[in-house]
Structures are given as structure tokens and as C-alpha cells.
Image: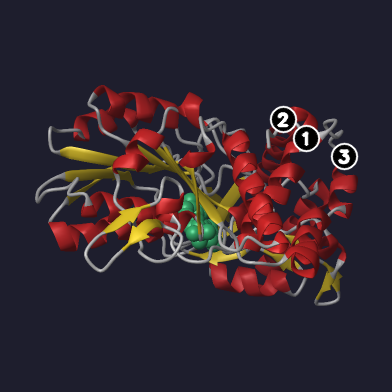
């Protein structure tokens, strides 16, 4: 099936009240107050269309895929593969065979690290470059390779605003540099990295690049061909889709040469005790029964996102960011961490004399959900001389009124600690 623009019908007018009505959870109360959900970098809420797609699948179409010749198995397979095509269109990959369904960003990165290692892409002393603002899921897989293969991890530094220092990146490259893996948008700072430039620089030296797109896909239009990256990993649950499903995009010519990540059913062509031949990509990387309903649900989330114009989503979220930055900056004793010029709607902050955990706990009593802690970016938090921040992260269904409530609740918190 060809997925075309017409599959998505007319682009919806961006109307935040109408958008909010698509998300049932947004009308619930928490601690007797209307929920103010500002933890979207951790996970986004789900629209009816996604919830109903999942429910419909289990009610009417549930079967294992790529196996049985029976009716339901064919329906389920078709739905799952249709979702793969939607992902392909969504990120503008060249082919659906470049779309591997995984558990999430974390598994996508681990898959690449493991498979490249198995291919002997790395020798002892070879270097992998990451950045100072990586999520742990783009640090630990490479540290595991460091322990296993003796590779060296190099880190692109950042400035005090929380931006990558691009000139330093090129200086880190040596003939031993074999891979670059960098986050597209920082979950802690909101910084949008100049990933296209990073890819261009790395490619001058024939070094493949992986981009961690976990925080990008719900907020920016992604075009992997335009970015030129070799791999792009993201999670369904951070873009209005279900948990337990994500995507690893990889250029076909690289995936073809990479050995499987896990062995099992689905990923083989023929098996004997002496020799096994593998299936074509992407199936070679999808051992076992996959998260079928997750894939189909992700397809529904993509349909939902594509019913809007990304430029409008971005414009609106930038408005929220500007409004929130101003409002929170005006609170005495509050300091925003992460002031990149190019930033998505994430505001990390600390307050003099109030521990982030206390902030989170107290404003929760007002029904406000934010995240506190190191956000799985401990080296980054330490770079700012901290152990934790409070973080409000926005999605397109958030409103300025919710930021007002956040500010009021923070002021109440500060008063309690005085
Ligand atoms: N990379 C980035 C940039 C992330 O923000 C996250 C999750 C991951 C990778 C891992 O994604 P997963 O879906 O595989 O778990 N970030 C967060 C967060 O900021 N708060 O909770 C999870």
C-alpha cells in the first residue's frame, strides 16, 4: 500500500482546545485539581485515535504476523507492514526495509552498537564520539563496548548555554574514529543540535553517524535523507504512540552488511544445525514475535501527527517556550538551565534553597506533573555543577494557562520554604 498525503486527508487547523479534546487523560483530575501534564519529554499522552486503534486490533484483528496463512494473520501482517510504511513516509526514508521496529530509542542504539561490534567494526583503541548532553541510553551501550572491545569514548564539549561546541567536534576526529552518536534534541536542556552539520563533518571522514531522535519526532519534521544520517532512533511513546515500540532507521547498504542483533524466529530464511541463512532487512533485525499492536498504534500516532502541519506545531510550542521562559525567569531565585539559541519547549530549572524533589512533590499536590532528577543525563547535570533539576517539558496540547498554574505553584512552594 502506498501511503500518500491523501491518506491523511486535509491538514487540521491548529486549535489547542480541539487538540486537548483528542486526549482523554487531559480532562482528568489529580489531587482534586485539573491535571497539568508537563512531563512530555518522559512520555506523551495518547489521543483517542491511538487508544482506539489498539483496542480495535485486539477486539477484531489479533493474530501473529508473517506466519499463518489464515485470514486474521494476513490482516494483522498487513496492518503491521502498513505501519512500517507510515514510518518510512514520516521520516522520509528511502525504503520501508530501512525501518526496523524496536522497543524504543534505547534498543535502537543498543542494536547498532551490538551489531557493529559483532561485525568487528571496532578494534581496540578505536574511537566513538558522543556529546556531553547524551541520555544514558547513548552512553552506556558504548561503554559496554569499551569494556568488551577496548574502544575509546570521546565527548564533544558544550558551552554554558548548553550548546555543542561544534569546532571542538572536528578536533576530536582522528583516523581511529569509527562512529559518531549524538542526540538530536536534548531531553534535559531542550537544545536542538546542529545535527546536519555534524553528519556533514563526520562524513568528510567517512564516519557513520547515529542520531538519537527521542525528543525530536513529536516536535520537528524529520527527514532522514535531508539530515543524511546513517541511523536515526526514536520512541513511539514520546510522540503520542504506545510504549514498547520504537524505530531504528538505518541506511539499507549499512543494514545489509550488519549481522543480526538477536537470533530467533522471523529473522531467518533457512535453519539447519549446521548453517542458518538470514532474512532480508528489516526482518533480519526483528527476531521473535514483535510488538504488533505497538507498531500499529505507532502508525495511528503518525496519522495523528501528520494531520497537523509541523510548522504550526513548532510555532505553537515555541510560543509556549517563550512564554514559560519569561514567566519562570521572573520568579525570584529561579534559574533556568539550558539557554541554547535553538531550543525546543523544555525548561529545566533550579530554585535557590529548594531541592528539585521538593519542588516536584509540592507542585504535584496542585495536580502539576513535572520531572525532577538527573533525567538520565548525569554527566550533563554535573557539567552544570548540579545533581538534579526540575524540568517542565511541553507538547502541542499544553496551554499558557497551564504555565501560569506552574508559576503560581512554584511561587507557593518558594513561600513555604522561606
Ligand atoms: N534519548 C533521549 C534523548 C531521551 O530523552 C530518552 C528518554 C531516551 C533516549 C530513551 O528513550 P526510551 O524510550 O528508550 O526510554 N528520556 C526520558 C526523559 O527525559 N525522562 O524519562 C525518559
Gap between marks 2 and 3 measured at Cα = 24 Å
Q: Residues within 10 Å of mark 3 (few under 14, many from 20)?
A: few
In the image, residue 193 above or below residue 215: above
Decide if ligand 1 comes within 8 Å of the CB at mark 1: no
Viewer-nearest residue: 17 or 262: 262
Name the quadrant containing residue 412.
Answer: bottom right
Q: How many marks?
A: 3
Q: Is residue 156 left or right of residue 30?
A: left
Query: Which disc number belongs to residue 7?
Result: 1
Q: Which one is earlier in the sequence, the residue at label 2 or at label 3?
A: 2
Q: Whole-percent x and y of residue 409?
A: 74, 64
Q: Whole-percent x and y of residue 13?
A: 87, 33
Viewer-nearest residue: 88 or 411: 88
- Mark 3 = which residue? 15
Disc 1, SS: helix
Query: Which disc number belongs to residue 4?
Result: 2
Quadrant for the N terminus in the image: top right
Quadrant for the C terminus in the image: bottom right
Viewer-nearest residue: 97 or 246: 97
Gap between marks 1 and 3 measured at Cα = 21 Å
Query: Which disc number belongs to residue 87?
Result: none
Q: Which one is earlier in the sequence, the residue at label 1 or at label 3?
A: 1
Amino acid at each position: 500500500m502506498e501511503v500518500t498525503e491523501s491518506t491523511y486527508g486535509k491538514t487540521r487547523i491548529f486549535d489547542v482546545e480541539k487538540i486537548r479534546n483528542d486526549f482523554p487523560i487531559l480532562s482528568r483530575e489529580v489531587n482534586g485539581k485539573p491535571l497539568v501534564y508537563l512531563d512530555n519529554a518522559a512520555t506523551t499522552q495518547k489521543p483517542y485515535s491511538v487508544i482506539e486503534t489498539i483496542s480495535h486490533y485486539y477486539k477484531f484483528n489479533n493474530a501473529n504476523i508473517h506466519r499463518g496463512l489464515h485470514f486474521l494473520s494476513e490482516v494483522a501482517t498487513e496492518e503491521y507492514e502498513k505501519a512500517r510504511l507510515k514510518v518510512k513516509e514520516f521520516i522520509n526514508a528511502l525504503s520501508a526495509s530501512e525501518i526496523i521496529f524496536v522497543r524504543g530509542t534505547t534498543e535502537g542504539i543498543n542494536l547498532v552498537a551490538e551489531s557493529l561490534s559483532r561485525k568487528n567494526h571496532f578494534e581496540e583503541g578505536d574511537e566513538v564520539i558522543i556529546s556531553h548532553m547524551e541520555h544514558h541510553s547513548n552512553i552506556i551501550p558504548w561503554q559496554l563496548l569499551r569494556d568488551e572491545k577496548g574502544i575509546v569514548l570521546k565527548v564533544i564539549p558544550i558551552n554554558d548555554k548548553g550548546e555543542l561546541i561544534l569546532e571542538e567536534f572536528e578536533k576530536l576526529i582522528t583516523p581511529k574514529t569509527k562512529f559518531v552518536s549524538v542526540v538530536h534534541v536534548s531531553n534535559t536542556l531542550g537544545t536542538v543540535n546542529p545535527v546536519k552539520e555534524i553528519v556533514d563533518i563526520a562524513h568528510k571522514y567517512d564516519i557513520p553517524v547515529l542520531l538519537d531522535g527521542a525528543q525530536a519526532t513529536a516536535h520537528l519534521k524529520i527527514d532522514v535523507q535531508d539530515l543524511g544520517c546513517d541511523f536515526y532512533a526514536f520512541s513511539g511513546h514520546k510522540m503520542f504512540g504506545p510504549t514498547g515500540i520504537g524505530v531504528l532507521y538505518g541506511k539499507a547498504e549499512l543494514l545489509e552488511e550488519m549481522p543480526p542483533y538477536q537470533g530467533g524466529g522471523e529473522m531467518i530464511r533457512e535453519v539447519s544445525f549446521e548453517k542458518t541463512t538470514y532474512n532480508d532487512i528489516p526482518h533480519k533485525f526483528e527476531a521473535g514475535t514483535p510488538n504488533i499492536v505497538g507498531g500499529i498504534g505507532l502508525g495511528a500516532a503518525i496519522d495523528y501527527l501528520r494531520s497537523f502541519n509541523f510548522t504550526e506545531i513548532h510555532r505553537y510550542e515555541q510560543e509556549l517556550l517563550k512564554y514559560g521562559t519569561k514567566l519562570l525567569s521572573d520568579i525570584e531565585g529561579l534559574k533556568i538551565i539550558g539557554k541554547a539559541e535553538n531550543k525546543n519547549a523544555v525548561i529545566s530549572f533550579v530554585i535557590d534553597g529548594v531541592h528539585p524533589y521538593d519542588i516536584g512533590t509540592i507542585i504535584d499536590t496542585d495536580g502539576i506533573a513535572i520531572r525532577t532528577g538527573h533525567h538520565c543525563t548525569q554527566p550533563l547535570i554535573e557539567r552544570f555543577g548540579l545533581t538534579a533539576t526540575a524540568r517542565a517539558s511541553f507538547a502541542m496540547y499544553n496551554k499558557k494557562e497551564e504555565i501560569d498554574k506552574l508559576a503560581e505553584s512554584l511561587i507557593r512552594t518558594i513561600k513555604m520554604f522561606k
